[in-house]
Amino acid sequence: MSLGDLIPQLAGLSLGPPGTRPIGLGGQNFTHCCMLALNDSLAVGADGNLSYAPTSFVAPGLSIPALEVAIRDDEFPCGATFDGDAAGAPVVRVPYDWCVARCPGWEISHSDAMQQWIGPLVQFIVPSLAFCTNVPRTRKLGIPDVVFRAHPRTLAGLGSYWARLLGAVLLATLDTVAWLATCFAFAGPMLMSAIYEYALDRRVLEFLAPPGGAPPDVTHRLRAQLLIAVVVGNVRMATPEEDGDPSAGRHGSGAVSGDPERKPAVPVRRRRMSRLVHNSVWKKIMVLVDEYEASSAVGSQPEEVVSLPTKLKALLNSQASFGSTVGAPVLFFVGGFVYTVLDSDNNLGDNDTAHALAFGLWWMVIPYLAIISCAMLASNSPSTLDGIVYDGGLTAPKDNYRPSFWSQYLKRAKTYRGIGFVLKKLEGYNPVETVFEGRFRTVKLWKRGLNKREWVQEAASEYAAYAASRGGDVSIPPGELRESLTLNSLDCLYVLVGALFAVLAPCCLAFLTSFNTPQAGLSCRSLTYLVYAVSQVCEIALWSCAARMKIKHGVRWPDARPVAKRVCWWGQVFVGFFAIFAAVGGTLMQLLGVYRSCACKVPVRYWPRLSDPDAFIVLSDNTAEDIEAAQRWWTVTGSTAVGVIGIVCALAWWHQRRLRKVFRDEANKLSTKDTEISQQYSV
């Protein structure tokens, strides 16, 4: 009598895994490995009964009769599933050396195992693709116009129509996936900058409308400039222009003379603005204030010109509704996640389900990023601003912008013979294009916070020039104004804590779920979450260091060459590599199944001593330890994640609505007939 006669599951067991796929490409099967280990652990005695072999891989303490009962009650250890019995299946565990010798390679994800790749892909990554479209960006993958020139009215056109359509869809999908990977890998500095901008919005609006206090006695022009900075602070500043007219004031825009009683002789839009130290983008947008003050100075009726409050509220309303952009998607995402958590109770003890849940908890970084991005007041698109602000017409000179750090290195690389030849051959080919068309450009999300600060400080600088022109006879000293509009240490601490929480909360929940899934300990998946979390913390630290230096150097920052600047830049490159590896590489290895290997089934603490007897690998499924860990952690971590993201979304919506209300109220105050409405300042 053979072993297969007593245990039908072991009948006809082959030495190699089933299938033709090479084991180095995912052809391994660890359920088959479990059966090999069980086959090596049992023997048939002379009396035809089962007995343990001299070297047995079945957990000590389990008798042969108990094993036979388990097999008879559908608790065969290899491939067992949860049937409501918390006792679980027998444990089969092997030393690492045996696993490497008998079961090398890794096991690719199977299409019939939903929680291995289809579940995580559909439940977490596909919704994240929708969330990442709400994260503001400046560049996208260009789709050639040729793919939109199909004419299906002819036979040849009909044949190329589908090819062009497929090409456009593939490029758009590639672009979205690449942006999703970017958002995930660099979520830390993105969240830091976004929360910084959000805190700065609150700081500015609470300066204009102090809670429970009297509003500051400042000019209408400063109020208007600060409100404009709130809604257009994501627009990129151009390079400063030198003053071409010595008689022109540094901060005067030429819209109205320094004398508020003098009426302009020509219409506002026909007057030539002098070249000032301010950059051209600032001057163009501040025409909104100049026009309104000019119309007030000449006594125009409100119905003859679109009022400044109306334009400001139009800019505010150009930002899509929080509920439609991210609120409703978060609700559906949370609903699907709740179903996943509740349904996981039917698969207690399944390691694939445990790690799929941890994977979903980890990817909640993207919904957090989308929530914070949509809570800001500045519109992601400058299109409305293009329609409101006069751009000077076709004869207006183009705005000049500082080259990026990468562009400067690229320019330097062109001076080298070999690399320069290749780069010159590629000139004219630009596979990347701007997201929005128009005169104004937006900045990247990780630069938006500091960019808005530049707008706010620009308004403060103009106020300082106005105060100097009046000999300091102003209600609020310029220094006090700057301090009121600058985030203090407590505000910066809140920004840091908020960014760290949004990044680390999902990572910690994912880490706890994987870390406590047997065999408990730090292993490949939990190590991935740890590396990702550490890389994001380092990215936030480097961003903070660079931001501090930018604030210190001010407008001299692009030309400054401190050693710390290079350290921060190359540090971001170095840390970014690990962030990309953990985010993109970890996701691919989880979906493909690379983590289902002998090395990843052993805790990291045993990697330096893999021959240790305690460095064993559990090959059986649905053990009692698996079931206990699932009951202890799955519902707790899943429910915590759902509750926290729901609270964060509700708070972001509430605070945005509150700030929008304050903004509209302050904009409406600009329309009051006050003696300050025509007050001008220039130096």
Image (tube, helix red, strand yellow):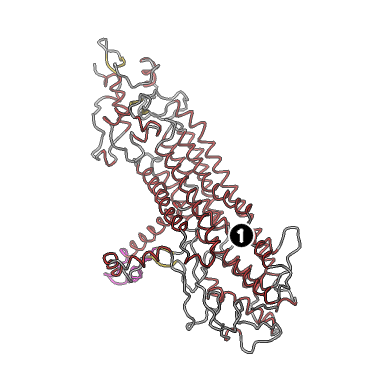
**Residue in the foreground of this view, choosing between 554 and 325:** 554
Left or right: residue 494 compared with residue 561: right
Secondary element at image label 1 = helix
Residue 524 position in % (x across, y down): 39, 38
* Image quadrant where one finds the N terminus: top left
**Residue in the foreground of this view, choosing between 475 and 212:** 475
Residue 155 is one of the magenta-drawn residues: yes
Residue shown at 45% from the left, 58% from the top: 563
Residue 292 position in % (x across, y down): 65, 78
Residue shown at 60% from the left, 47% from the top: 647
* Image quadrant where one finds the C terminus: bottom right
Quarter location, residue 671? bottom right
Query: Taking 558 as reference, is 612 above or below it?
Result: above
Residue 314 is one of the magenta-drawn residues: no
Residue 641 position in % (x across, y down): 54, 43
Query: Taking 101 as reference, is 207 above or below it?
Result: below
- Is there any visible trace of residue 199 in the rendered image? yes
Q: Residue furthest top?
A: 47
Left or right: residue 329 compared with residue 178: right
Quarter location, residue 120? top left
**Residue in the foreground of this view, choosing between 543 and 224:** 543
Judge the density around disc 1: few (<14), some (14-19), many (≥20) Cα neighbours within 10 Å.
many
- Is there any visible trace of residue 313 in the rendered image? no
Quarter location, residue 14? top left
**Residue in the foreground of this view, choosing between 207 and 94:** 207
Left or right: residue 241 compared with residue 33: right
Query: Taking 235 as reference, is 634 above or below it?
Result: above
Q: Residue furthest bottom?
A: 265
Highlighted range, magenta: 141-163
Residue indicated by mark 1: 200
Amino acid at dot 1: Leu
Residue 342 position in % (x across, y down): 51, 38
